[in-house]
Image: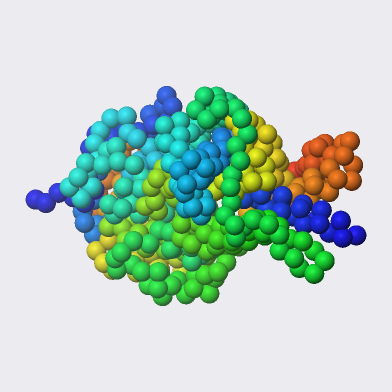
Amino acid sequence: MLGLVNILIGGIAYGFVLFLMAGGLSITLGLMGFANMAHAALAMVGGYTAALLIGKAGWPFLAALAMAGVTAALVGAVLERTLFRRLYQASELEQVLLTIGVVYVAIAAATYLVGPEQMAITVPAWLDGNLRLGPIDLNRYRLFLIGSGVALLLSLVHLIEHTTFGAKIRAAVFNRRMTASCGIDVDKLYALAFALGSALAGLGGALSIKLLGLDPNFPIKFLTELLIVVSVGGLGSLRGTFLAAMLFGIIDVVGKYLLPEIGAFIIYATALALLTVRPQGLVGRLR
Amino acid sequence: MTEPLLQIDKFDVGYGDGIVIHDLQLGIASGGSLAVLGRNGAGKSTLMLAIAGHLVPRAGRMRFDGKDITTAPPHRRCRAGIGWVPQGREVFAPLSVEEHLRIAAAPGVWTIDRVYDLFPRLKERRGNFGNQLSGGEQQMLAIGRALVTNPRLLLLDEPLEGLAPVVAQDVARCIGEITQADNMAVVLIEQHAGFALRLAQQAIILERGVAVRRGTSQAIAADRDALEQFVGIRKPVRAA
């Protein structure tokens, strides 16, 4: 019984890792409707930034995390201004082709610049080890991930649903022409929103290395999971992304433990079943 | 003589291969008002889209407030003082009434509170989303959304279309109040030619994208042959 509780906690922690990485994608793909495969590459950019700053330059953990977000935002903004903005009105296929190309370039670049080996991250002492709560051992870093995930969910929901910036994005996605005629520079607004989504990718990438590891194939390994989380959650719904991340985190960890032979397959089967029954996603609406 | 607020010269506008508006000449003085009449497909809405910046002319120039805005993007035109109330209202379904006004608001005499004073109904519905409003409420919101950008020229494209008669009267009265105050210029398209001609000082009749009549609203209202031939109105029309 206690074992199962610990597995469940592991699943929840993995769910939060998924959410931390998918939160930004639910802005660029979910809200802005841009089929952004490069999101996972931006997460890798954040991961390498944090790992190298801590490992080679001796930066403190939290400062390196912040820098991971900033670097990914910059890279994302440059990509958006030079390449992606041309394809906002294009078909999803064209968007996928371009952004998946960026993923392969990123993999090659990471292999060339940093090397193909696994990269580890050292976390500070206050995040290392376990916290004993009665009979349950709680890993401090996992608790930190859960706290970060909750903070991210609350601030993103606030930003999108309760600020003028969020209202402008919702307006532009719904009716770009009318939004421009309200005096809003939609081009600039999209660039900002994309940079924000990229920053969150970088932050999520940096936070997840300790659990997921980091090598140049990181974007390909986790792209499918991220896309599943955002689409099963429902495009445009942060709460849906969060729910789906929890669901798949738990299913994946529990499934691999209980049915190790088919463990890796379970989340795909679940995604397929859920999307067959609810093509609009858990929370989303069909557009 | 001072330059008009909006000056359109030798304007050709079209979609794809076709030219919809041809060789149009138009001037609207600061605080002036113009009714645009004509049948469906005469180019009225196309003219509005071109002034708002959503269609770039094939030929010709447009000046606003002394500056050339022929190629200026829509958001710059809005900030320069052109407010657009589109046909069909185009409210944002995923935004609340209050959010519509907040995202559009720019400094000036038209504040969100003043819009609520003008349309108390919107204040009652401030938390409702765009798709939860009645047609009349949507129209008030579309007008309010344009007003809080503090335009010097307001483009009204069929503001009474599809409204119940009582609601239409109420909206028409509010449009009258708005245009009297603050020296705001107006371009109005309306199927109810009588309302348009009473509201506006000047009028123009478009037929296949060409201005076939222009003059004071009184003169156009008296020109019953032109109204019958180009607008399809047989009964007498009363201007202000």
Residue at position x 86%, y 56% in the image: A3
Residue at position x 73%, y 60% in the image: A138
Q: Residue B47 at x, y = what percent? A: 36, 42
Name the quarter where the N terminus of chain A is drawn.
bottom right
- Residue B103 is drawn in which quadrant? bottom left
> Can residue B92 be seen in the rendering of this structure?
no
The answer to which of B24 and B79 lies nearer the viewer is B79
Q: Residue A84 at x, y = what percent? A: 48, 33
Give above or below for A116 relative to B202: above
Q: Residue B187 at x, y = what percent? A: 33, 52
Give above or below for B73 relative to B126: above
> Can residue B112 be seen in the rendering of this structure?
yes
Residue at position x 76%, y 68% in the image: A133
- A224 on left or right of A63: right
The answer to which of B77 and A248 lies nearer the viewer is A248
The answer to which of A46 and B158 lies nearer the viewer is A46
Residue at position x 79%, y 41% in the image: A267
- Residue B205 is drawn in which quadrant? top left
Name the quarter where the C terminus of chain A is drawn.
top right
Q: Residue A110 at x, y = what percent? A: 53, 29
- A117 on left or right of A80: right
The answer to which of B51 and A232 lies nearer the viewer is A232
